[in-house]
Image (tube, rainbow, N blue to C red):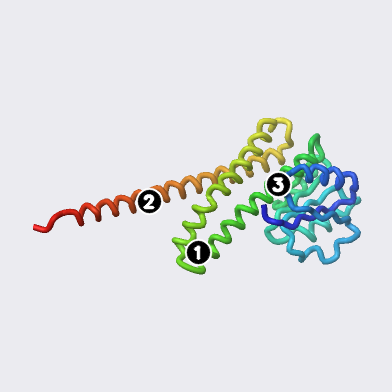
Amino acid sequence: MQDYRVVLITDDAGFARSLKTLWQTERALPPFRTMTTDDLSGLGESPLDVMIVGPVRNKRLPSVLKLVDIGERPVICIVEDSREVKTLKAERPRVLAIPQHEGWIEATLLLTVECLKRLDVTARLRRAEQAAQASSRGAVLGRYMAESRHDLNNSLTSVLGNAELLLLDADQLPESARDQVLTIHEMALHMHQIMQRFSSAETRTLEKASQDETDQLSHNSIPAQ
């Protein structure tokens, strides 16, 4: 996985330690930086990829979110309960909110991992587009997609598998968390369908090339009258 820059903002040292312990059990994850709300100068314009906002001191959450919820980067925010989830989603619909229910630290890790994987797939596709524009677009893009198909399919399988595991216990999740998991699942299925169409198109292209070559050989073998 690419070396993404992840920052955790929290005033709860216990949460930071617990998340770091879980984080270290995952393979190939980049290290993340932990900050408190007392030291956020210059953070807003930093080129960060994923922001995690954990429990912070009273009344500081709105100002922290105003600082970090910019651009297209994912922002994951920990709130106290499902009522705060609804309030937060109404004010900042892009923010991924997780209430402090049973297993909320594990849910934070899982959602962060899936965000990183989505960014990884997006970065691969963006590099493919840039490579296609630099030279013969169709051929370069097709070749890159063919070379990356295995990695992309592995990433999609991981996303789908984790989302489906969460959905098995969907009744125990808050409504907002279920909606987020369903969105992850639906987007992964959509990307899987795109890859399936790409595979079908590639197969048809190879079959046509083979048929054209066969026809040419057959034409050349016909004796002149």
* Identity of the residue furthest to the left in this view: 225
Which dot, 2 or 3, sits closer to the camera? 2
Percent position (x, y) of residue 96?
Answer: 73, 48
Residue ID for mark 1? 132
Gap between marks 1 and 3, in whole Å? 29 Å
Residue ID for mark 2? 206
Residue ID for mark 3? 113
Query: What amino acid does circle 3 point to?
Result: Val
Which dot, 2 or 1, sits closer to the camera? 2
Percent position (x, y) of residue 92?
Answer: 73, 53
Q: In this view, does 137 lie above or below 121?
A: below
Name the residue rendered at 48%, 45% in the picture: 196
Q: Which of marks 2 and 1 is nearer the N terminus?
A: 1
Name the residue rendered at 73%, 47% in the picture: 112
User: Mark 2 and 3 residues: CB-CB less than 8 Å, in contact?
Assistant: no
The image quadrant that residue 36 belongs to is: bottom right
Point out the image quarter for the C terminus: bottom left
Gap between marks 2 and 1, in whole Å? 20 Å
Query: What amino acid does circle 2 point to?
Result: Leu
